[in-house]
Image (cartoon, helix red, strand yellow):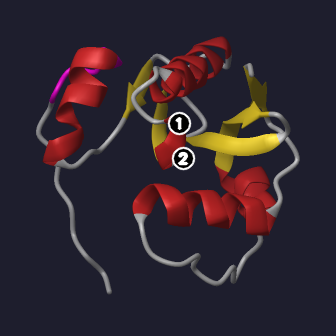
């Protein structure tokens, strides 16, 4: 079986929500605002990984409309993890941001993902801040 990376693919709410549930644990969150609507409104681009027509990976690239982009929702189906798919998704996302004229791609990550983002994907660790609003 081969995996295809598809940029700005037509998003199915149930399929993407199910992938997030598998990748991040827990049940799918109810979709209040459809994924496609959110992505069209806020994302520079997004990339999906498909195997035999099934969505097994996803990442979105948001941006400020200028030089800065940032990654959100990087997810790989647990059965497809640790095979380079996440790295391929992040690489494709950063190439899309570069092609759009961005100079910087930011990503926030939890400590257990440091190896992935820093060692595998080449991000430089920086200080960042976070406020929980809910």
Q: What residue did someone put label 2 on?
A: 77
| Relative height, residue 120 to residue 81 (above, below) | above
- Look at the numbered discs 2 and 1 and tell me whether their residues touch, using CB distance below 8 Å: yes
| Relative height, residue 11 to residue 57 (above, below) | below
- Name the quarter where the C terminus is drawn: bottom left
Based on the displayed image, in which of its 4 quarters is residue 113 positioned? top left
Horizontal and vertical percent position of residue 101 = 61, 16
Label 2: few (<14), some (14–19) or many (≥20) C-alpha neighbours in 10 Å: many
Q: Residue at x 82, y 53 (%)?
A: 11
**Mark 1, secondary structure of its residue:** helix
| Relative height, residue 59 to residue 32 (above, below) | above
Confirm whether residue 76 shows in the render: no
Label 1: few (<14), some (14–19) or many (≥20) C-alpha neighbours in 10 Å: some
| Relative height, residue 10 to residue 32 (above, below) | above
Disc assigned to residue 80:
1
**Mark 2, secondary structure of its residue:** loop
Based on the displayed image, in which of its 4 quarters is residue 36 positioned? bottom right
């Amino acid at each position: 079986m081969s995996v295809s990376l598809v940029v700005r693919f037509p998003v199915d709410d149930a399929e993407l929500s199910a992938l997030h549930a598998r990748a991040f644990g827990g049940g799918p969150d109810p979709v209040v605002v459809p994924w496609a609507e959110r992505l069209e409104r806020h994302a520079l681009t997004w990339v999906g990984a498909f195997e035999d027509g099934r969505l097994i990976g996803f990442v979105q690239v948001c941006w400020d409309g200028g030089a800065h982009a940032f990654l959100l929702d990087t997810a790989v189906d647990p059965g497809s993890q640790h095979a380079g798919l996440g790295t391929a998704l992040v690489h494709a996302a950063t190439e899309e941001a570069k092609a759009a004229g961005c100079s910087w791609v930011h990503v926030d990550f939890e400590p257990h993902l440091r190896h992935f983002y820093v060692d595998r994907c080449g991000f430089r660790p920086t200080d960042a801040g976070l406020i929980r609003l809910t």
